[in-house]
Amino acid sequence: MTVSAIENANKGIVGKVWERKCTFVWQTGDEHAAQSITLANLLGALENVIVVISGVTGNPTVTVTLTDAATGAALVTLSAMADGTVHFKQYPNDFYSVLLAGGDVELTVDPSADAGGEAQTLTVEVVLRGL
Protein backbone atom coordinates (compact mmCIF):
# COMPACT_ATOMS: atom_id res chain seq x y z
CA MET A 1 0.00 0.00 0.00
CA THR A 2 1.24 3.45 -0.85
CA VAL A 3 0.00 6.93 -0.05
CA SER A 4 1.74 9.67 -1.99
CA ALA A 5 2.98 12.95 -0.61
CA ILE A 6 0.49 15.76 -0.37
CA GLU A 7 1.04 18.67 -2.66
CA ASN A 8 -0.30 22.18 -2.38
CA ALA A 9 -1.32 23.00 -5.93
CA ASN A 10 -2.25 26.66 -5.49
CA LYS A 11 1.16 27.96 -6.48
CA GLY A 12 0.84 31.37 -8.07
CA ILE A 13 -2.83 31.82 -7.19
CA VAL A 14 -3.62 35.05 -5.41
CA GLY A 15 -6.24 34.89 -2.66
CA LYS A 16 -7.46 32.29 -0.27
CA VAL A 17 -8.02 29.39 -2.67
CA TRP A 18 -6.47 26.13 -1.49
CA GLU A 19 -6.15 22.65 -2.91
CA ARG A 20 -4.79 19.38 -1.54
CA LYS A 21 -4.16 16.35 -3.76
CA CYS A 22 -3.58 12.84 -2.39
CA THR A 23 -3.03 9.60 -4.26
CA PHE A 24 -3.74 6.17 -2.75
CA VAL A 25 -2.50 2.94 -4.38
CA TRP A 26 -3.31 -0.76 -3.88
CA GLN A 27 -1.55 -3.55 -5.81
CA THR A 28 -3.00 -7.00 -6.47
CA GLY A 29 -2.59 -9.01 -3.28
CA ASP A 30 -2.59 -5.94 -1.00
CA GLU A 31 -6.16 -6.84 -0.07
CA HIS A 32 -8.31 -3.76 0.32
CA ALA A 33 -7.67 -2.29 3.76
CA ALA A 34 -8.59 1.38 4.10
CA GLN A 35 -5.75 3.89 3.83
CA SER A 36 -5.69 7.23 5.64
CA ILE A 37 -3.60 10.36 5.72
CA THR A 38 -3.82 13.37 8.01
CA LEU A 39 -4.06 16.76 6.32
CA ALA A 40 -2.74 19.38 8.73
CA ASN A 41 -3.96 22.91 9.30
CA LEU A 42 -6.77 23.14 6.76
CA LEU A 43 -8.48 26.51 7.02
CA GLY A 44 -11.58 27.68 5.15
CA ALA A 45 -14.66 26.24 3.51
CA LEU A 46 -14.50 22.97 1.58
CA GLU A 47 -16.06 23.59 -1.85
CA ASN A 48 -15.17 20.61 -4.08
CA VAL A 49 -14.02 17.02 -3.79
CA ILE A 50 -12.76 15.34 -6.96
CA VAL A 51 -12.20 11.57 -6.92
CA VAL A 52 -10.53 9.74 -9.83
CA ILE A 53 -10.62 5.93 -9.57
CA SER A 54 -8.70 3.67 -11.94
CA GLY A 55 -10.40 0.68 -13.55
CA VAL A 56 -9.38 -2.79 -12.35
CA THR A 57 -10.74 -6.31 -12.81
CA GLY A 58 -11.79 -6.63 -9.14
CA ASN A 59 -14.51 -3.98 -9.71
CA PRO A 60 -14.37 -2.44 -6.24
CA THR A 61 -16.47 0.49 -5.16
CA VAL A 62 -14.74 3.19 -3.16
CA THR A 63 -15.76 5.21 -0.11
CA VAL A 64 -13.99 8.49 0.71
CA THR A 65 -14.40 9.96 4.19
CA LEU A 66 -13.17 13.21 5.70
CA THR A 67 -13.05 13.13 9.49
CA ASP A 68 -12.17 15.76 12.10
CA ALA A 69 -8.90 14.36 13.47
CA ALA A 70 -9.51 15.84 16.93
CA THR A 71 -13.07 14.60 17.51
CA GLY A 72 -13.43 11.69 15.08
CA ALA A 73 -16.61 13.26 13.69
CA ALA A 74 -17.31 12.49 10.02
CA LEU A 75 -17.40 15.70 7.98
CA VAL A 76 -18.02 14.29 4.49
CA THR A 77 -18.70 10.72 3.31
CA LEU A 78 -18.85 9.88 -0.39
CA SER A 79 -19.67 6.23 -1.01
CA ALA A 80 -20.42 3.60 -3.66
CA MET A 81 -18.17 5.18 -6.30
CA ALA A 82 -17.32 2.59 -8.96
CA ASP A 83 -13.85 1.85 -10.29
CA GLY A 84 -12.98 3.37 -13.66
CA THR A 85 -14.89 6.59 -12.91
CA VAL A 86 -14.35 10.26 -12.10
CA HIS A 87 -16.51 12.05 -9.53
CA PHE A 88 -16.86 15.80 -9.01
CA LYS A 89 -18.68 16.50 -5.76
CA GLN A 90 -19.48 20.00 -4.59
CA TYR A 91 -21.14 21.98 -1.85
CA PRO A 92 -24.15 22.31 -1.51
CA ASN A 93 -25.31 19.59 -3.92
CA ASP A 94 -23.31 16.63 -2.61
CA PHE A 95 -22.40 17.50 0.98
CA TYR A 96 -23.24 20.03 3.66
CA SER A 97 -21.06 23.05 4.37
CA VAL A 98 -17.76 22.10 5.95
CA LEU A 99 -15.85 24.93 7.60
CA LEU A 100 -12.32 23.95 8.52
CA ALA A 101 -10.90 26.00 11.37
CA GLY A 102 -7.22 25.32 10.88
CA GLY A 103 -7.30 21.89 12.48
CA ASP A 104 -6.29 18.52 11.15
CA VAL A 105 -8.55 16.44 8.92
CA GLU A 106 -8.15 12.72 8.26
CA LEU A 107 -8.78 11.62 4.68
CA THR A 108 -9.65 7.91 4.37
CA VAL A 109 -10.14 5.90 1.18
CA ASP A 110 -11.72 2.46 1.54
CA PRO A 111 -12.15 0.16 -1.48
CA SER A 112 -14.68 -2.66 -1.17
CA ALA A 113 -12.48 -5.32 -2.83
CA ASP A 114 -8.95 -6.18 -3.90
CA ALA A 115 -7.72 -4.83 -7.25
CA GLY A 116 -8.14 -8.39 -8.63
CA GLY A 117 -6.47 -10.12 -11.53
CA GLU A 118 -2.74 -10.41 -12.07
CA ALA A 119 -0.61 -7.28 -11.68
CA GLN A 120 -3.57 -4.92 -11.20
CA THR A 121 -3.16 -1.51 -9.56
CA LEU A 122 -6.07 0.37 -8.04
CA THR A 123 -5.25 4.08 -7.87
CA VAL A 124 -7.54 6.60 -6.21
CA GLU A 125 -6.71 10.27 -6.51
CA VAL A 126 -8.58 12.68 -4.22
CA VAL A 127 -8.45 16.44 -4.69
CA LEU A 128 -9.92 18.76 -2.05
CA ARG A 129 -10.56 22.39 -2.99
CA GLY A 130 -11.71 25.22 -0.81
CA LEU A 131 -11.78 28.92 -0.11
Image (tube, rainbow, N blue to C red):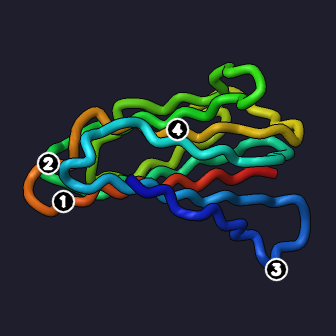
Q: Earlier in the sequence, mark 3 or mark 1?
A: 3
Q: Earlier in the sequence, mark 4 or mark 1?
A: 4
**Nearer to us in this view, 86 or 108:** 108
> Which label sits in the foreground, 3 or 1?
1
Q: Earlier in the sequence, mark 3 or mark 4?
A: 3
Q: Are marks 2 and 1 in contact (CB under 8 Å)?
A: yes
Q: CA distance from mark 3 to mark 1?
A: 37 Å
Q: CA distance from mark 4 to mark 1?
A: 21 Å
* Kind of residue at disc 2: Gly
Q: Residue at x 61, y 42 (%)?
A: 90
Which mark is on residue 120?
1
- Drawn side of residue 11 relative to residue 55, left or right: right
Q: Earlier in the sequence, mark 3 or mark 2?
A: 3
Q: Which residue is mark 2?
A: 116
Q: Are marks 4 and 2 in contact (CB under 8 Å)?
A: no
Which mark is on residue 12?
3
**Nearer to us in this view, 93 or 81:** 81
Q: Residue at x 75, y 32 (%)?
A: 98
Relative to residue 30, is residue 4 depicted above or below?
A: below
Q: CA distance from mark 3 to mark 2?
A: 41 Å
